[in-house]
Image (cartoon, helix red, strand yellow):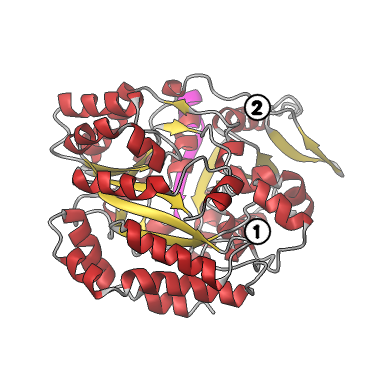
Amino acid sequence: MKILFVEPPKVFWFVMGEYMPPPLGILQLAAYLESKNHKWDIEVLDSQAEDFGWDKLQRYIERAAPDIMVSSALATCNTFTILRTLEIAKKIGPNIKTVVGGQHFTALADESLKMYPEIDFVIRGEGEVTLHELVKSLDENRPLLDVKGLSFRNGMKIVHNSPRPFIKNLDDLPFPGYHFVEDHMNKYNFKMMAHSGSGYALVEASRGCPHKCTFCSQWKHWGCKWRPKSPERIADEMEQLYTEYGISFLWLTDDNLGLGKTTSKLCDELINRGLSEDISWFVQSRSDDIIRHQDNLPKMRKAGNYWIMAGLERHDNDILNNYHKGIKPSDSKLSMDLLKENDIFSQATLITGDRNDSHESIQGLRDFVNYVDPDIAIFMILTPFPGTKLYETARENGWLEDDNWANYDMVHAVMPTEYLSRNEVQEELYQCYRSFYGSMRRRISGVLSRNKFKRQTYRYMAGQGLLHALRDLY
């Protein structure tokens, strides 16, 4: 049985600058299959690292001749690149079984199987065990009706098997299969974040989030549960990436790892192993968590945490309450100041294009961010991703004016507000970036900052032409 995992050709999110992340999702799945059956022929193709376009991808699939092809889930905006990849496989070999998963296809499993004949199987929810049982069933020519978490066609009927229970102990999972792409490890980079030569990799320390933000597809996908790996396991994975592959910049990809006991114990592990002087790592957090666990910040900095991103989102309590965010605007300034006081680079993410937004309210957001003064700010347009309450509401009310999934990337406006057209929402996004990064004081202080990450980031961004790229969107 030959299983080919594919990271399709795609366009990266230009707001992040030049970066090429390793395909963590399919590396995790490939490693899990390998741990269950060493007789299967498993291969991972990263089209980005190989610099493959569609023609080269087609020739590669022809040579590989897989029995099963699994596409990286990616994001909603990459849906059509996934579908094109599956189309190529079906063109080469109609009997190749094609598999997709992730949040988008989990939320739209029925719709996707009805609309896209190139999809054979949708894995809903957590993928490892379901994919293993699917491959095993296909290999042994067994019925598929008992494979929990699987959606597929059975003749003319679409079948959705019962949901798959979540893995109880994530420490039982093997390390992601970086050995499948070891020839490309020197190509993975994040130039805005990682220093030259440091390498770049992703680490999943937990899955899920207990919060229920209406714009987020993650919490529902993971059952509104937070399941961390043990601090020892997380440190083991970070150490392996450093010692075996020389990776010294790591992004902990968790939606909400939190800054409490797990993170504190992780810091102890990194310090005790002598890794804190050799690696640096980035984590996402909440403003209230930063304040609640501010006593952990010095230890985090000592353990190599140089960068924290916090979703501040908005300046108005009513909208935050509508989002079920559970934070207060008054936390924003304090949380960013606490990071700066501990020499941790502070990144804030903000939301524009709320249904109630007007020119005046977004100007209020700009004023708020300038007051809070994070080291960098990333503004995003409110986007109704499938699987969210926001998507259901927008669809029911006819707000969606763009059904091209490629534009569901948080920088294209796909719906208007009560007071602004889509073009006006787009213009306001540009003005947000112009207001923040157009400040000469901020530019100079960034380039001359004593914080090495802030200094490097502002020097990098100075040559990226971000504002020109945003202007070209409309």
Is residue 235 visible in this depiction of the protein?
A: yes
Q: Is 359 left or right of 172, judged from the image as shown? A: right
Question: 448 or 153: which is nearer to us?
Answer: 448
**Which residue is at a point 26% across and 52% down the rendered structure image?**
186
Determine the image quadrant of residue 366. Answer: bottom left
Question: Is the N terminus in the top left, top right, bottom left or bottom right quadrant?
Answer: top right
Identify which amino acid the numbered label 2 is placed on.
Arg
Mark 1 or mark 2: name the one nearer the start of the chain. Answer: 1
Q: Quadrant of residue 273?
A: top left
Return the residue at label 2.
164
Q: Is residue 436 magenta?
A: no
Left-right relation of 24 to 184: right
Q: Position of residue 261 (x, y in %)?
A: 34, 23
Residue receiving disc 1? 87
Query: Mark 1 falls on what kind of element?
Result: helix
> Residue 418's image quarter?
bottom right
Query: Which range of residues does the magenta coloring cover?
Result: 33-46
Between residue 286 and residue 6, name the one nearer to us. Answer: 286
Would you place residue 168 above or below residue 63 in this image? Answer: above
Residue type for callout 1: Glu
For the point 69% across and 27% down, which residue is it? 147
Measured as percent of width and height from the top left, residue 151 is found at 73, 38
